[in-house]
């Protein structure tokens, strides 16, 4: 371990030190450029961004707020032209509107309509600049998806009585998508995106008295009165007292085909309904499509879906249509992790058990397959629409907030970011177990598993913790066995990506160690397994999202810079500088070199 001067392909850079700068800080020898900012024009006719005079009509044609997932889809072998697909997770109105113009108790209809237009997704074409980095160019692919965009509900729950509303008596068409957090590019060139904290948009769940309906709402965190954004005042569909089923039409994985700007995006009911962080696909050896997913809530679960049919190769319109349809019929599973060390050795302190690892075996428990339910008391339709309640019946492992779950194409293993869970071990809450071994887990951990015989359709697997995050000087951290005096501190892993060498890259949300969030690389094989190195930090108050790592380009989404400080006295002025209010933006980073094409992680 830790041979001095050893160079790991793709991770050979001088780590960035923890800091609280109001800047994106990259390693020596690297350069950066903002690709697109909140408010930048996307569709033809979009006006230039004007923080002091924003309108809903302008926002609907401009880049949305709080960029999260970033999908980069090359359109040629060298990646000179690419489709860039970005999620806009949520809005922070007190930071978005000029000081004194936004009353939290009485937003104007125009302000609410701006928020509707600032949610959703953006598709643009981005070209390599010969001097380095990516720049957005006008193209026929430019698209904004907002709260007004029609989505088709597909799969086994489409048309269900639970999904019917007064505006959509057939239960098959939903307007909009919200709280789109992470996602994944599919092998057929579309994008999957998770509707995560959809609950916060629905008012008056607390007025529901029917016990079954109330229990369902409670399990999804919807038992309050008015919402903080007050959308229910301007469209009754956000008011559960008036439109009880609209809430069931959110909390899905959606699929967007960025190659076809006129396509109708899809909500895939076969992938279940929960606080979807994201979804990532692996084609199994036999051609079936496997989707890995996390439900980001304290003590919630990890899921996978295995299609019945087999994928077509390529990204043609035919393959895109065929393979998307595979997500309509298959088996939905939830994960149970069993440790191999005695429970007495898992004391919640994070101390390693006597076998030297947090590890064990696991099982995928089927919930439903097509129209057949495997859960007593639930129809298949109910499994898909009320997935959390169905999963509760089969004793899966309650995890420390499952964020990204993603297969590594290099070694076939699957990696899950468990971001944190300060309630672990609290009175009346779940105790530590070997897969979630720390009580009051503030810094999170990273889990790795291998499906039985490397077959992604398998129903059993073996697992271990790769990282137990935090301050390397603290006794409760673990870095894959790598010497802890040679790693960067890391806290609250959220999004994961892999480079062309199979190294894991992790972006963080909510650094509990006091410095800014950032992006880290970590080899998962060989003597340097576990050597976490910080590649960049993001500005004050921001979360690092969306990472994309290619051989010569890194993309990071800087989400909510300066969040919560309010527009009057922002504590971030990134990226425009001076006295400007902060703007969520996508940043490209590259290593200096000829034609802007130095290789990432090589010296
Ligand atoms: Fe939107 Fe789970 O992060
Ligand atoms: Ca063990
Ligand atoms: Ca996330
Ligand atoms: Ca997050």
Image (cartoon, rainbow, N blue to C red):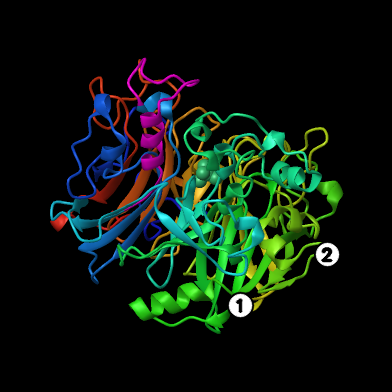
Query: In the picture shown, does residue 478 fall above or below 473?
Result: below
Q: Which residue is mark 1?
A: 455
Q: Is residue 325 above or below residue 343?
A: below
Span shown in magenta: 97-122
Instruction: Using residue 167 as the reference point, say whether residue 203 is left or right of it.
Output: right
* Residue at 34% from the left image edge and 42% from the top image edge: 64
At x 13%, y 56%, the residue is 130
Label of residue 376 in the image: 2
**Label 1 element class:** loop
Foreground label between 1 and 2 = 2
**Residue 177 is one of the magenta-drawn residues:** no
Q: Where in the figure is residue 389, as x and y percent of width and height? A: 74, 53
Q: Nearer the viewer, residue 515 or 60?
A: 60
Image disc number at residue 136: none
Do the numbered discs 1 and 2 sit on residues whose CB atoms are within 8 Å?
Answer: no
Q: Residue 37: percent from the left, percent from the top?
A: 28, 40
How far across and down, in percent of the image, does residue 201 sit? Answer: 54, 38
Q: How many marks?
A: 2
Q: Earlier in the sequence, mark 1 or mark 2?
A: 2
Q: Up-down: is 53 above or below 508? A: above
**Cα distance between the residues tagged 1 and 2:** 28 Å
Please state which of residues 59 and 169 is positioned toward the viewer in this rendering: 169
Q: Residues within 10 Å of mark 2 (few under 14, many from 20)?
A: few
Q: Is residue 265 visible?
A: yes
Q: Evaluate whether residue 601 shows in this view.
A: no
Q: Nearer the viewer, residue 31 or 545?
A: 545
User: Where's residue 596, x and y in %?
Assistant: 17, 54
The residue at the point 48 percent across, 21 percent down is 104
For the residue pair 52 and 413, the one nearer the viewer reads as: 52
Q: Secondary structure at mark 2?
A: loop
């Amino acid at each position: 371990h830790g041979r001095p001067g050893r160079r790991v392909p793709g991770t050979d850079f001088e780590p960035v030190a923890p800091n609280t700068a109001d800047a994106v800080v990259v390693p020596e020898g690297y350069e950066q450029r903002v690709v697109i900012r909140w408010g930048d024009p996307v569709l033809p006719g979009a006006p230039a961004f004007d923080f002091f005079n924003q309108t809903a009509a302008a926002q609907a044609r401009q880049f949305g707020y709080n960029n999260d997932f970033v999908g980069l889809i090359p359109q040629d072998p060298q990646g000179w032209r690419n489709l860039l697909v970005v999620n806009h997770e949520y809005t922070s109105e007190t930071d978005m509107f000029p000081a004194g113009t936004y009353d939290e108790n009485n937003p104007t209809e125009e302000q609410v309509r701006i928020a509707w237009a600032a949610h959703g997704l953006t598709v643009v074409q981005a070209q390599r600049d010969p001097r380095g980095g990516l720049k957005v160019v006008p193209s026929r692919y430019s698209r904004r998806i907002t709260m007004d965009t029609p989505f088709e509900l597909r799969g086994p729950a489409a048309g269900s009585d639970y999904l019917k509303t007064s505006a959509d008596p057939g239960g098959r068409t939903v307007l909009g998508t919200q709280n789109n957090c992470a996602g994944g590019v599919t092998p057929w060139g579309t994008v999957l995106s998770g509707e995560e904290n959809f609950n916060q948009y629905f008012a008056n769940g607390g007025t529901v008295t029917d016990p079954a309906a109330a229990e369902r709402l409670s399990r999804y965190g919807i038992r309050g009165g008015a919402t903080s954004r007050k959308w229910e005042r301007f469209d009754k569909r956000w008011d559960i007292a008036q439109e009880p089923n609209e809430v069931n039409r959110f909390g899905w994985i959606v699929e967007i085909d960025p190659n076809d700007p006129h396509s109708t995006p899809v909500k895939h009911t076969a992938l279940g309904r929960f606080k979807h962080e994201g979804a990532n696909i692996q084609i199994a050896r036999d051609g079936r499509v496997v989707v890995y997913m996390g439900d980001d809530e304290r003590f919630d679960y990890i899921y996978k879906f295995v299609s019945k049919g087999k994928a077509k190769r390529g990204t043609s319109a035919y393959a895109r249509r065929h393979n998307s349809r595979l997500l309509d019929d298959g088996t939905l599973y939830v994960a149970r992790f069993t440790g191999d060390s005695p429970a007495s050795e898992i004391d919640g302190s994070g101390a390693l058990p006597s076998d030297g690892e947090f590890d064990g075996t696991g099982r995928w428990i089927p919930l439903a397959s097509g129209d057949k339910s495997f859960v007593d008391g639930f129809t298949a339709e109910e499994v898909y629409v009320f997935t959390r309640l169905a999963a509760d019946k089969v004793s899966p492992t309650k995890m420390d907030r499952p964020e990204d779950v993603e297969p590594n194409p290099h070694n076939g293993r699957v990696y899950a970011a468990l971001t944190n869970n300060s309630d672990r071990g609290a009175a009346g809450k779940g105790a530590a177990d070997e897969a979630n071994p720390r009580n009051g887990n503030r810094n999170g951990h990273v889990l790795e598993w291998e499906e039985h015989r490397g077959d992604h359709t398998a129903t059993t697997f073996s697992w271990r913790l790769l990282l137990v995050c935090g301050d390397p000087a603290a006794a409760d951290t673990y870095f894959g066995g790598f010497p802890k005096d040679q790693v960067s501190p890391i806290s609250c892993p959220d999004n994961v990506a892999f480079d062309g060498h199979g190294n894991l890259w992790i972006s963080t949300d909510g650094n509990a160690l006091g410095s800014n969030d950032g992006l880290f690389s970590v080899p998962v094989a060989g003597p340097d397994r576990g050597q976490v190195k910080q590649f960049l930090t993001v500005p004050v108050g921001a979360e690092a999202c969306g990472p994309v790592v290619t051989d010569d380009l890194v993309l990071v989404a800087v989400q909510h810079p300066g969040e919560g400080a309010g527009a009057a006295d922002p504590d971030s002025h990134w990226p425009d500088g001076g006295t400007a209010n902060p703007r969520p933006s996508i940043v490209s980073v590259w290593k200096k070199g000829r034609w802007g094409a130095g290789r990432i992680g090589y010296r």
